[in-house]
Image (cartoon, rainbow, N blue to C red):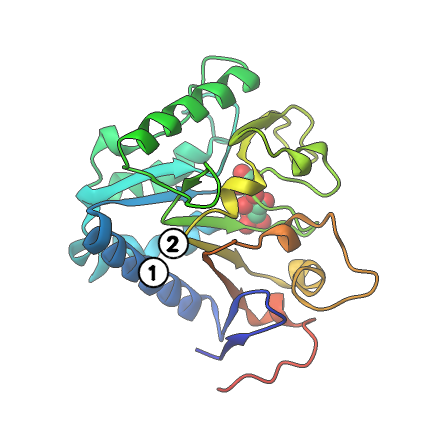
Amino acid sequence: MALSGVKNNRGELRILENLDELRTDLADYIAELSEAAVKERGVFAIALSGGSLIGLMGKLCEAPYNKTVDWAKWYIFWADERVVAKNHSDSNYKLAKDGILSKVPIVPSHVHSINDSVSAEEAADEYMFVIRQLVKTRMVSVSDISDCPKFDLILLGMGPDGHIASLFPSHAVLDETDEWVTFITDSPKPPPERITFTLPVINSASNVAIVVTGESKAEAVHLAIDNVEPNCPSLPARLVQPTKGKLVWFLDKPAASKLDDLQFSE
Ligand SMILES: O=C(O)[C@H](O)[C@@H](O)[C@H](O)[C@H](O)COP(=O)(O)O
């Protein structure tokens, strides 16, 4: 690992030397959290996003992880999904299925993707209902300070504008506190129709990881992590602040290149 440490109360930063090291560190991190959750609760409830994240998780399908991870105990969700058919090239489900889920022994009934045959609004409502049922049976834990689900791990990417999941800068859904899952029809990043976990759900998770690579995101990383003036209250990535859980940033060096005074131990 190149650098690691805690900065400005904004979580743990892991800045990796190159993409290969990042992939290995990310796979180790996910495998460790899976083992801990299975030991403690008997299951591992993990929520994925789309984008480059899935490719960066690829080492999980290789040795030793493909054999050592207790895949049968995984329950898979999406922190956000594009409202398109499951076989569409824009589908986050398809991305994860082709990239990971079809390559490891996940139980098909544990894969909770959205209903792709209804409107964005209905898909969000139905997804919330599905999660509610799984909270009742404790396949997904519940937060002890809100009534929100408490996922063992929520994995997020970040766009160059600082968006995470399908929560975009200055969008009204950033203020959504009543629903666990909501929808948008005006995403600035295509496709326009999406469903997304809301901030209260993201911030109720036991663990949240934000995985960011490339220089095009360096400014957003700086705005999300450093103490900047004026600060950016509506930058979604800055609003990821798990109440009791742990936040970890996985960055490559180009993505970390605009962070102020990095003085971590090598
Ligand atoms: O479905 C989506 O569009 C996402 O879940 C979105 O939040 C993504 O994670 C970021 O846009 C980063 O994507 P990249 O890593 O591909 O830049």
Total marks in image: 2
Mark 2 residue type: Met
Residue at the far top: name it.
Answer: 118
Residue 156 coordinates in the image, percent (x, y): 50, 49
Secondary structure under the numbered disc 1 in the rendered image = helix
Which mark sits nearer the N-terminus, 1 or 2? Answer: 1
Would you say 2 lies left or right of 261 here? Answer: left
Give the answer, above or below, for where 223 lies relative to 109: below
Q: Which residue is pictured at 63% across the width and 52% down the height?
A: 237
Residue 37 coordinates in the image, percent (x, y): 27, 53
Would you say 174 lies left or right of 81 here? Answer: right
Give the image quadrant in which the ligand numbered 1 is located. Answer: top right
Mark 1 residue type: Ala
Q: Can the viewer see residue 62 in this picture?
A: no
Looking at the figure, which quarter contains the N terminus? bottom left
Question: Residue 76 is drawn in which quadrant?
Answer: top left
Question: Residue 263 is drawn in which quadrant?
Answer: bottom right
Q: Which residue is pictured at 56% across the width and 18% down the height?
A: 121
Would you say 169 lies left or right of 89 here? Answer: right
Compare residues 46 and 245 and report the one nearer the observer. Answer: 245
> Which residue in the structure is indicated by mark 1?
27
Residue 160 coordinates in the image, percent (x, y): 67, 52
Crowd tier of the residue under label 2, counting other residues whose Cα lies within 10 Å: few below 14, some 14–19, many 20 or above:
many
Q: CA distance from mark 1 to mark 2?
A: 6 Å
> Which residue in the structure is indicated by mark 2?
57
Residue 230 coordinates in the image, percent (x, y): 83, 61
Crowd tier of the residue under label 1, counting other residues whose Cα lies within 10 Å: few below 14, some 14–19, many 20 or above:
some
Q: Are marks 1 and 2 in contact (CB under 8 Å)?
A: yes
